[in-house]
Amino acid sequence: MFLSFNNYTFILKHFIISFILIIAQSYLPTIKVSNSLFLYSDLLLIYLTYLSITKRIYIIIIIAFFVGIFQDLIIQNETVGLYSLLKVLAVYSISYLNKVKTLWNMTFKYLYLLIVYFLHYFIYHFIFVEQMTTILSFFILFEAILNLFLFIVLDKVLSQKLSI
Amino acid sequence: MKPYKLYFLNKDIISLIITVLISLNLFFSNDSTYVKNIEERIIDFVSYIVYPKTWYEDILIVKTENDLLKQRIIQLKLLNSKLDNYQLENDKLKKMLVFKESYPRLSLKPANKVNHNYSSIFTIILNVGREDGIDKNQAVLDMNGLVGKTIVLGNQASKVQLITDRNFAVSVKVGKEMILSTFKPTHGRLGYLERVIKSIDLNIGDIIYTSGVSQIYPSDLPVAKIKSIKNNPNKIYQDVIVEILADIDNLNYVFIVQ
């Protein structure tokens, strides 16, 4: 009832934006590291990071869940539920920044975001590889740094919500 | 506090738990190799985590089994010693059977010693009595030789005067000439022969048999063997010391000559 009447427009709007981002992501350029590894920006994760910092978290969790399932169905239908799980966990972890907004400095907040991104990608790749190597760990770290960089840029350019 | 209010207080956590559970359910319901690999890794991890608990439980089980096996060993040892005893008894009974068959002319009644009485005279109590057809003054022997004679009878038991009793005497035949003599006990398993004249040729180790002169003891029952012979020039007779053949100290099964 609460979701249906009070946040219907809000949820629908962000669903549509998320789906557009998922589709847009497939057209973005990627950096080929090896035959099987491609470094790419996860626009949806960046967008969910923005939402989890600025909006009410339980709604963002539900959005992240459904968008994650949609992403699973588009990208990797053999592991449906994986992206939704990772996105939900990432969103909830990032929302912790709201609680420590005035306690932590920017560096620490970015470091925390980097750790969350790293864990998000680490678990994702861990599912698909036989053995986790040092090179792959570095690749995941670079992937997390790239997305954090994009988030920082967007945050600075658009709203500076994180820094407020 | 009503449940729906609780929901709104913890809506972040509840929405997280619900979405995580649904995601996990969806993920593990897939049949792809990736999911199977993850399941295997999770199983390995869980088994690694619970290994100490399993190890501890195994130790407890081993300890319990060890206690049970110890008890079982003790039971088997007791059973084994019982079976050993049965085997010994069986061997003894077989020998007794052979012994009985070696005296076809005698009617031998097997009996079991139930008590040993040293109070007044050297006696033992047997588990056969008047009801078994036993009479007074019947010879008693074991597989080695003469043991004694029945002196008191009950309905189901009888008292036997042992050959080691000082008041005991039995007529025996000595040497190749079968000269009559009398055996009398002295102490322990030793005894002596009376009135054995010097002309009789005796050897150490010769077996002395009953003469059959008395009505109590049939002839040719082994009594003793010669242990030493002394010829004193001042005496008419030889000093013949004999050793009782019957295993008086370890009597168990005996025969009564009927």
Image (spheres, coloured by chain):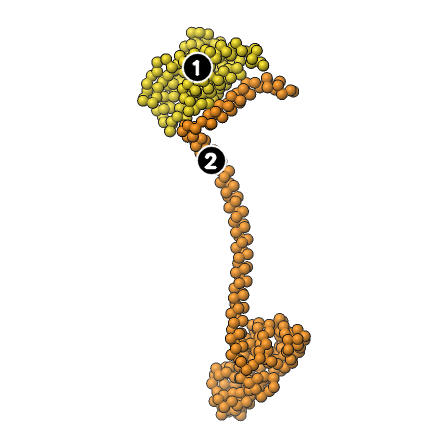
Chain colours: A yellow, B orange
Image quadrant where residue A128 sits = top left
Foreground of the two, A40 or A102: A40
**Residue A43 can be seen, yes or no:** no
Q: Mark 2 points at which residue?
A: B47
Q: Name the residue under label 1.
A: A44
Crowd tier of the residue under label 2, counting other residues whose Cα lies within 10 Å: few below 14, some 14–19, many 20 or above: few
Asked if residue B120 lies left or right of residue B227, the reply is right
Q: What amino acid is found at the position of numbered circle 1 in the picture?
A: Leu
Q: Where is residue B14 in the image (x, y as percent from the top left)?
A: 55, 21
Marks 2 and 1: in contact by CB < 8 Å?
no
Crowd tier of the residue under label 1, counting other residues whose Cα lies within 10 Å: few below 14, some 14–19, many 20 or above: many
Which residue does the image show at 49% across and 88% down from the upper left? B175
Image quadrant where residue B156 sits = bottom right
Q: Which of marks 1 and 2 is in front?
A: 1
Chain holding disc 1: A
SS label for mark 1 = helix
Q: What amino acid is found at the position of numbered circle 2 in the picture?
A: Ser
Which residue does the image show at 51% across and 75% down from the upper left? B98
Which residue does the image show at 48% across and 83% down from the upper left? B206
Asked if residue A104 lies left or right of residue A2, the reply is left
Q: Position of residue A44 (x, y in %)?
A: 43, 15
Q: Where is residue B47 in the image (x, y as percent from the top left)?
A: 47, 35
